[in-house]
Amino acid sequence: MSKLTDNLRWESSRMMLPQHKEALIERQNPPSETVRAQVPTREELEMIRDSVLLPIMLTMVEKNGKDMQLSTSSIRKLYVAATQVLMDRIHFELAAINKELRAKKIKVFKDDQEDTDLHYKYICRGYENKFAIMRDVARANISVKLGEHIQRMIEDMKARER
């Protein structure tokens, strides 16, 4: 041992910020690999997929709503109102998914698009991975989710009639 480490007077004169102390302790006791990088569950992967597809679906519905406003149909007001309710539902679902992803410490980023597919990267509690969604698969998933939302809207309207 050197004179400085054995000298208590020197030891007491050193100043260490709490952040530095935490970093030093963490470096001395690294967390196990299972805590550091956890592979996402199937449910989390579905949430990641939905967090990517719901904004696209929202844009599609919004565009259709604007087209409907310009329509000369006699029941366009009904279509526009239904479109707005549908957009509110999609936005609510997207907000809930994003909130849950933040709570689970999962981040999703758009990646470089090298081709016509949709490329994304996600970080899930230290685990990083990339994925791509083919446009046809995205359209099919959006169609299914859109059908589910419309079905729930119809069920809600029927329940209010009673």
Image: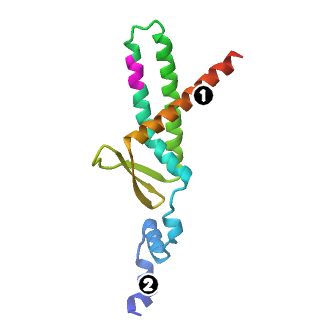
Q: Earlier in the sequence, mark 2 or mark 1?
A: 2
Q: Residue at x 29, y 47 (%)?
A: 113
- The vertical placement of 71 against 134, above or below, is above
Q: Label 2 belongs to which residue?
A: 9
Toward the viewer: 19 or 146?
146
Toward the viewer: 3 or 147?
147
Question: How many angstroms separate mark 2 from mark 1 (CA)?
Answer: 72 Å
Q: Of tags 2 and 1, which is closer to the observer?
A: 1
Q: Label 1 belongs to which residue?
A: 152
Toward the viewer: 37 or 46?
46
**What's under tag 2, amino acid-wise?**
Arg
Q: Residue at x 40, y 76 (%)?
A: 14
Q: Tell me which secondary structure the magenta stretch mostly adopts.
A: helix
Q: Secondary structure at mark 1?
A: helix
Quick one: quadrant of the N terminus? bottom left
Give the image location of residue 136, x and y in percent: 40, 39
Give the image location of residue 25, x and y in percent: 48, 74
Residues rendered magenta in the picture: 62-67
- The vertical placement of 118 against 13, above or below, is above
- Residue 127 is tagged as none
Q: Secondary structure at mark 2?
A: helix
